[in-house]
Image (spheres, rainbow, N blue to C red):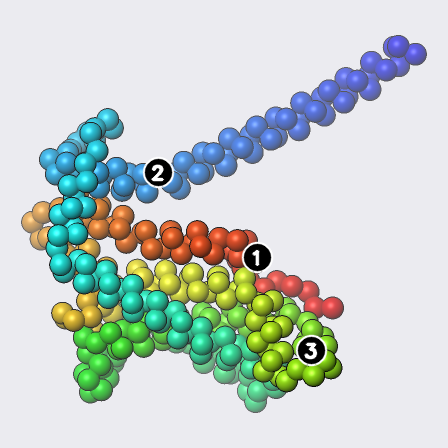
């Protein structure tokens, strides 16, 4: 009896060893990948905390005394504060507006029989097919004619046009994945179509709404070309101000790193605030209808 139990114990031990080894390898790969992804942010943040003379030192100083000198200099520049406030205001307004337009549009395309629906979707998607450099000149002419050049309203509308197709396409996928029986049950209980949309469909699509809000915020926040062409002083975005630290003869590495780090903070705060919706949201509404 004792001899019969040895092979089973050996096989069980081998299986446990293999599972442990697989876990160790998996965690090692994930840890290595995390280091690779996080290292550029560490490099940027550490450069922003170095004194001006050490920011571009070669080889780099890995051990140094941190200083907030670059951030103090950055905040003392009223142009940066104005540009940062411009971007925060314009991008936030554009995200709210693009959701107010795109989410109902996606719901209509998902629930109603629209003539030539496929053509409408392709037309909406076509707004993102052309590279920005190909459409920036027509927008410049239109903005000049409508007195929208170098205005915050004009930039908000520009950001909306950039992200509208993304919101419509992604949210349509979410609405397609939400069973219509939920709305039918709400209407049986006396709810109108709009009440069913507001109280039943929107809560179910909340992960998708937050996901497209994050993506729209990032796309608008990092946009540079349209800000370069369509603004001059009043509505300058923060990306354009950060770009100003790159001169023709030299680059202010410390100030550039500090400004870039400050630019990342709103995105990080936004991601942390809606983190619990991201896991479901990034699946892009892949829900099987019953």
Image spot of residue 233 (x, y percent):
13, 69
Image spot of residue 176 (x, y percent):
62, 72
Which of the marked residues, 1 or 2, is nearer the chain's N terminus? 2
Residue 198's image quarter? bottom right
- From the viewer's perspective, is residue 68 above or below residue 233? above
Q: Determine which of the numbered discs, if any, sits on residue 200 in the image.
A: none
Q: Nearer the viewer, mark 2 or mark 3?
A: 3
Residue 213's image quarter? bottom left
| Residue behind mark 3 | 186
Which of the marked residues, 2 or 3, is nearer the chain's N terminus? 2
Q: Determine which of the numbered discs, if any, sits on residue 39 in the image.
A: 2
Which quadrant is home to the C terminus? bottom right
| Residue extending furthest toward the top | 2
Which residue is located at x 61 percent, y 30 percent?
Answer: 22
Going by the image, does 209 lie left or right of 41? right
Secondary structure beneath dot 1 equals: helix
For this rendering, which residue is in front, 36 or 279?
A: 279
Image spot of residue 88 (x, y percent):
29, 63
- Distance between the alpha carbons at the discs numbered 1 and 2: 27 Å
Q: Nearer the viewer, mark 1 or mark 2?
A: 1
Which residue is located at x 61 percent, y 86 percent?
Answer: 113
Which of the marked residues, 3 or 1, is nearer the chain's N terminus? 3
């Amino acid at each position: 009896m004792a001899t019969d139990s040895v092979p089973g114990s050996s096989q069980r031990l081998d299986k446990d060893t293999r599972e442990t080894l697989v876990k160790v390898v998996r965690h090692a790969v994930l840890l290595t990948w995390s280091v690779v992804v996080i290292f550029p942010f560490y490099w940027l943040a550490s450069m922003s905390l170095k004194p001006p003379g050490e920011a571009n030192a070669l080889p780099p100083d890995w051990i140094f005394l941190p200083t907030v000198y670059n951030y103090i200099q950055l905040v003392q520049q009223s142009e940066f504060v104005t540009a940062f406030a411009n971007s925060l205001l314009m991008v936030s307004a554009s995200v709210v507006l693009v959701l107010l337009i795109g989410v109902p549009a996606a719901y209509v395309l998902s629930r109603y029989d629209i003539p030539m629906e496929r053509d409408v979707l392709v037309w909406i998607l076509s707004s993102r097919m052309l590279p920005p450099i190909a459409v920036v000149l027509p927008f410049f002419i239109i903005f000049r004619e409508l007195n929208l050049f170098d205005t915050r309203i004009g930039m908000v509308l520009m950001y909306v046009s950039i992200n509208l197709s993304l919101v419509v396409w992604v949210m349509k996928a979410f609405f397609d994945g939400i069973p219509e029986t939920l709305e039918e049950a709400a209407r049986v209980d006396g709810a109108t179509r709009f009440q069913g949309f507001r109280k039943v469909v929107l809560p179910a699509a909340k992960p998708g709404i937050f996901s497209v809000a994050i993506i729209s915020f990032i796309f608008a926040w990092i946009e540079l070309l349209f800000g370069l062409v369509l603004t001059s002083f009043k509505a300058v975005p923060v990306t354009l101000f950060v770009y100003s630290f790159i001169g023709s003869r030299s680059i202010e590495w410390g100030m550039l790193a500090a400004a870039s780090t400050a630019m990342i903070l709103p995105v990080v705060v936004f991601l942390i605030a809606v983190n619990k919706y991201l896991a479901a949201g990034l699946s892009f509404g892949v829900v099987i209808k019953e």
